[in-house]
Image (spheres, rainbow, N blue to C red):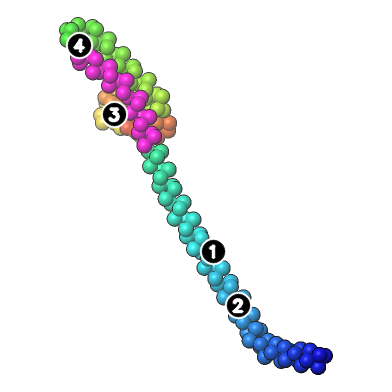
């Protein structure tokens, strides 16, 4: 039996020797192929993650816009209700109508304030081209330079962003 074992071991060793050069060649190629395959897989994963991120960002942007629009409309609905009630009233009471319009205006301005919108542009303020649009100019020595004398249309801004500049008349 020992002779058979020796022959078997010798045969196994010969096979190993024959296979070793091939294994060494495979080992030399395999690390590069493995690295290439890993890099390809990583690139595919990053590409898929970016596509998912882009889709998620687009959905979040659309949801934010829809939420902001709904919030704005819900704030203005009370004003619309008041205007509908005023129009359906058949009385010809001018003072009552004026009072109702004033209350509706105040309600609208309160709603805009809740949304972060503020009105600006008053006579006597200093003219600033970033916030005001001068449509007229008057020379008056009794007034300071670049002072607003009349406001034709008030300006509105949300936080620090101008929505509409004030249309004004300036002096000097």
Marks 4 and 3 sit apart, C-alpha to C-alpha, by 34 Å
Label 1 sits on a secondary structure element that is helix
Disc with the residue nearer the chain's start (3 vs 2)? 2
- Is label 1 or label 3 in front? 1
Observer-nearest of 121 and 12: 12
Marks 1 and 4 sit apart, C-alpha to C-alpha, by 70 Å
Observer-nearest of 157 and 83: 83
Disc with the residue nearer the chain's start (1 vs 4)? 1
Residue 109 in the image: x percent, y percent?
Answer: 35, 21
Residue designated by label 3: 167
Residue designated by label 1: 42
Cβ atoms at labels 4 and 3 below 8 Å apart:
no
Label 2 sits on a secondary structure element that is helix
Cβ atoms at labels 2 and 4 below 8 Å apart:
no
State which region is magenta.
66-88
Residue designated by label 4: 89
Residue designated by label 2: 30
């Amino acid at each position: 039996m020992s002779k058979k074992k020796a022959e078997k071991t010798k045969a196994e060793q010969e096979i190993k020797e024959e296979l070793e050069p091939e294994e060494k060649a495979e080992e030399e190629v395999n690390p590069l192929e493995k690295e290439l395959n890993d890099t390809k897989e990583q690139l595919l994963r990053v590409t898929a993650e970016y596509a998912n991120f882009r889709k998620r960002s687009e959905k979040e942007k659309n949801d934010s816009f829809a939420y902001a629009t709904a919030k704005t409309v819900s704030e203005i609905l009370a004003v619309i209700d008041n205007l509908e009630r005023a129009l359906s009233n058949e009385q010809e009471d001018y003072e009552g109508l004026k009072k109702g319009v004033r209350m509706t205006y105040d309600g609208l301005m309160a709603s805009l304030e809740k949304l972060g919108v503020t009105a600006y542009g008053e006579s006597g303020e200093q003219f600033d081209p970033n916030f005001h649009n001068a449509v007229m100019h008057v020379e008056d020595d009794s007034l300071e330079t670049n002072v607003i004398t009349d406001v034709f249309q008030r300006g509105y801004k949300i936080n620090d962003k101008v929505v509409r500049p004030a249309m004004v008349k300036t002096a000097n």
